[in-house]
Image (tube, coloured by chain):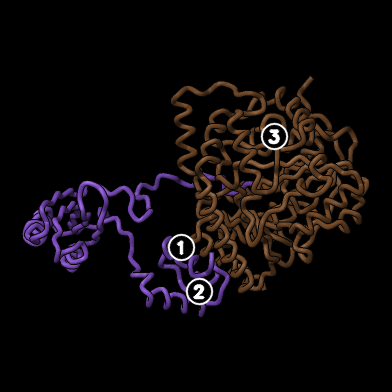
Chain colours: A brown, B purple
Amino acid sequence: MTLQPNDRVAGVPESGIRKFFQLAEERDDVISLGVGEPDFSTPWAARSAAIHSLEAGRTSYTSNRGMAELRELISGYTKRWGHEYDPDTEILVTTGASEAVDLALRTFISAGDTVAIHEPNYISYRPGIQFAGGEPLAVPTSADKDFVLTPEALAAAGADEADLLVLCYPNNPTGAVMSAAEISAVADFCVDNDISVIADEIYAALTYDGEHTSIATMPGMRERTVVINGFSKAYAMTGLRLGYALGPAQAVESLNRVHQYTMLSAPTTAQYAAIEALRSCGDAVTEMATEYNRRRRFVLSRFEEMGLDCFTARGAFYAFPECGGDDEAFAEELLKQQGVAVVPGSVFGAGGEGHLRVSYATSMRELKTAMNRIETFHRSQK
Amino acid sequence: MDTKRELLSLLSTDARESTEDIARQLAVETETIEQLLDELESEGTVRGYQAVVDWDNVDDQRVSAFVELNVELDRETGYEQIADRIARFSEVESLRLVSGDYDFAIEVTGDSMQDVSRFISNQIAPIPEITQTVTHFIMQTYKEAGIDFGDRDDDDRLSVSP
């Protein structure tokens, strides 16, 4: 018998991002605003710690849950968002936040469960839900509400019947954030309708004009929430693949059961880098966030000047302007005519059509040129 | 960070940004930036705007040296008075009072090693309060003003990623 993917796998289409990657790779003069990772290098202290750990031969497995010292540091670090998680029982170190998301989906979805996801959203949740045997339920968010998830939107989509909600704010692709009041409203909806939450907070440290609020800190939410975060975005450590999950002891125990049979432990070298990152790279994170914030304001102000409507994104490193028409055609022509790569919003699900994801994780110099090119292109479209 | 402080931090990264681009990045009006720049300059917070040059890429010969200076103070002469005499030489690029084994650390530039040596022996060493000079010629600059000349971290990211 030949190797055939099962129905779950076969039922998941290839990512729409793939096409743009291939188009962008075909030419070498492209300025890419299509990148979903920091342009900064990992702070040298963290890299140096990783190198030292390799030189010292620290290349064995660690305990399933991750090195005790790292969990201790994570416990301390996440207090800034009001979290209180016991390093011994309530923290699991994973191979990127991606693994934590996958673990949570596989652990908490029973066959046929309905899993609500607000859209537009990061492209991995829907397939992840499908791989895990759940039924994704799209809850559209829109520009007129700053892409914030509301109880009304949840109710309108029928999410009161959902078993699980995947929540990602600050959001990729929109750059939207949610205020404490807005998070609180969603928390009430989840408590009232007995919905558990997987809160992907990978961009929490990149929140501008205000503080990040975690839904797990809302009344009645801690016991029903798994918080996911990691080092990729804030510490510019994407390739080191290191994330973590926080949750009540029993939930983390369950996550660890899947984790220990699939990953065994997160990459050891990356754990050493993460320990040093948490110990000494706080200033580097602040510097990077300050720089992103400047670029964010620059990009938003340029969109306003060129007449592309764009809501005020306050998190991550994305802006999500309206392109006034077919986003895929716009992105494709922009790439062909001006050599600027962006990702069409429709790739990210309901509510994304007619928008572009513009990543400002690129140097100011390139951003300036790219924005001028987008302006030229936009004018030529009129 | 208030706008003035943030403007300073932005200028320290790139002083050549246009006023319009700075205004966009700090989300304020262009006039505000112009006014703040005036303030920073007139109050003496911003002392100048200079390029960070890798002189190895320039054909002209240019030699720099760090020079340690030891001085002996007396009732009439303090560090300020000595600094005042040294700072006036255009050959002196920087002048700092430091802690440790010597008193002043200065950077001197000239067209040749001979030029720099002559300057130290003819102009600096004879200053009565200076008891000792130690000259370190700079052989290679790897990093200056926070800018790494090595281009060590290339952008090798995928052009489009989720």
Q: Which residue is mark 1?
A: B9
Task: Give the mark toward the camera: 3 or 2.
Answer: 3
In this orientation, which residue lies closer to the viewer: A64 or B21? A64
Q: CA–CA distance between discs 3 and 2?
A: 49 Å
Which quadrant of the view contains residue A44? top left
Q: Position of residue B7 (x, y in %)?
A: 48, 68
Q: Amino acid at mark 1?
A: Ser
Task: Give the mark toward the camera: 1 or 2.
Answer: 1
Q: Residue at x 78, y 32 (%)?
A: A251
Label number found at residue B20: 2
Q: Which residue is mark 3?
A: A86
Q: Chain of mark 3?
A: A
Q: Residue at x 53, y 58 (%)?
A: A291
For label 2, the crowd category at 10 Å Cα-Cα, with few meaning under 14, some 14 to 19 and many 20 or more, is some
Q: Chain of mark 1?
A: B
Label number found at residue B136: none
Quadrant in which the C terminus of chain A appears: bottom right
